[in-house]
């Protein structure tokens, strides 16, 4: 019988990775088509339910212990991400073309807009959540590999991450990502007939920009307030 809570590093990393991959793939609507888009959305829903079940103990213990900067940010981002995902999933039922074949549901444009903007905010909040928990994710990776990284790898990874994050500022503009986080419309539409791989590379760079920004801001806030981030992994 599968345990209620996953504590091993590999299943947890795979679950979080699957959720983020599903969100990115969902934005490739005009490449994958409606059927694949809705199938990916269903897989994302199942992954979210599993993620909630796995982190239920963390939420129950939120009031216990010292409220660090990291715990506070996790609570705020978790609440905002939950609202975005609920809006995304509820509106997906109404805008679903597959369900419309059996259920006579009206096509309400405002719900399509909510679904659209909720998706952009969900993936942005997921990237910020990733950055806030970067130390925990790194600890899971080290635990999974069973070995510590060499000392020189830390600065090297930071240089690479910062370089990609700078590119991510331009990538977000190319994708029309930043305007849509301001609930504005953008004329940016990706031409999948011309190329496919750069679309996903631009998304990876944009999300890394948010993750790096969240991690840096957490480090600055923690250092200024002289509060150490929580070391226990979720």
Image (spheres, rainbow, N blue to C red):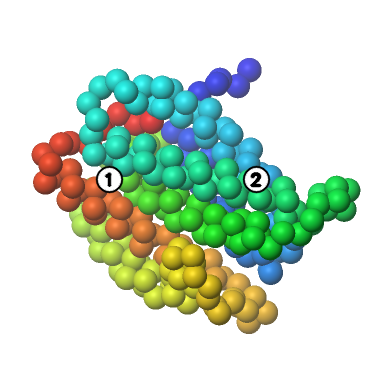
Residue plotted at (32% across, 70% down): 166
Residue 231: horizontal and vertical position, in percent?
A: 26, 32
Tell me the quarter of the picture where residue 119 sits: bottom right
**Image-based side of 24 in relation to 219, left or right:** right
* Residue 50 seen from this side: yes
Disc 1, SS: loop
Residue plotted at (44% across, 65% down): 182
Q: Which mark is residue 149?
A: 1
Which residue is most to the top? Answer: 1
Residue on which disc 2 sits: 90
Residue plotted at (73% across, 51% down): 94
Residue plotted at (24% across, 39% down): 69
Q: Are marks 2 and 1 in contact (CB under 8 Å)?
A: no
Eye-nearest disc, 2 or 1 = 2
**Which of these two is toward me, 43 or 108?**
108
Which residue is most to the right? Answer: 102
185 over 108 or under it: above or below: below
Residue 152: horizontal and vertical position, in percent?
A: 20, 54
* Residue 8 seen from this side: no
Disc 2, SS: helix
Compare marks 2 and 1 and give the one earlier in the sequence. 2
Q: Quadrant where the C terminus lies?
A: top left
Tell me the quarter of the picture where residue 195 sits: bottom right
Q: Which mark is residue 219?
A: none
**Which of these two is toward me, 68 or 32?**
68
Crowd band around label 2 with a 10 angstrom C-alpha radius: few (<14), some (14–19), many (20+)? few
> Distance between the Cα atoms at labels 2 and 1?
43 Å
Crowd band around label 1 with a 10 angstrom C-alpha radius: few (<14), some (14–19), many (20+)? few
Which residue is most to the bottom? Answer: 194
**Which of these two is toward me, 20 or 105?**
105
């Amino acid at each position: 019988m599968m345990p209620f809570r996953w504590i091993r590093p590999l299943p947890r990393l795979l679950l979080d990775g699957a959720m983020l991959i599903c969100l990115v793939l969902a934005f490739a609507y005009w490449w994958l088509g409606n059927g694949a888009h809705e199938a990916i959305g269903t897989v994302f829903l199942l992954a979210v339910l599993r993620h909630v079940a796995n982190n239920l103990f963390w939420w129950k213990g939120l009031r216990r212990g010292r409220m660090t900067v990291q715990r506070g940010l996790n609570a705020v981002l978790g609440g905002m991400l939950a609202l975005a995902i609920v809006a995304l999933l509820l509106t997906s039922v109404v805008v679903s073309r597959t369900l419309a074949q059996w259920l006579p549901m009206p096509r309400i444009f405002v719900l399509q807009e909510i679904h659209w903007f909720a998706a952009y905010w969900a993936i942005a909040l997921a990237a910020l959540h990733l950055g806030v928990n970067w130390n925990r994710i790194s600890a899971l990776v080290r635990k999974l590999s069973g070995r510590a990284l060499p000392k020189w790898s830390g600065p090297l990874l930071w240089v690479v991450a910062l370089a990609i994050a700078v590119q991510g500022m331009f990538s977000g503009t190319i994708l029309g990502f930043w305007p849509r986080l301001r609930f504005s419309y953008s004329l940016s539409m990706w031409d999948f007939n011309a190329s496919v791989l750069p679309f996903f590379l631009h998304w990876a760079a944009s999300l890394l920009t948010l993750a790096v920004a969240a991690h840096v801001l957490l480090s600055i806030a923690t250092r200024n307030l002289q509060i150490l981030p929580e070391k226990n992994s979720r």
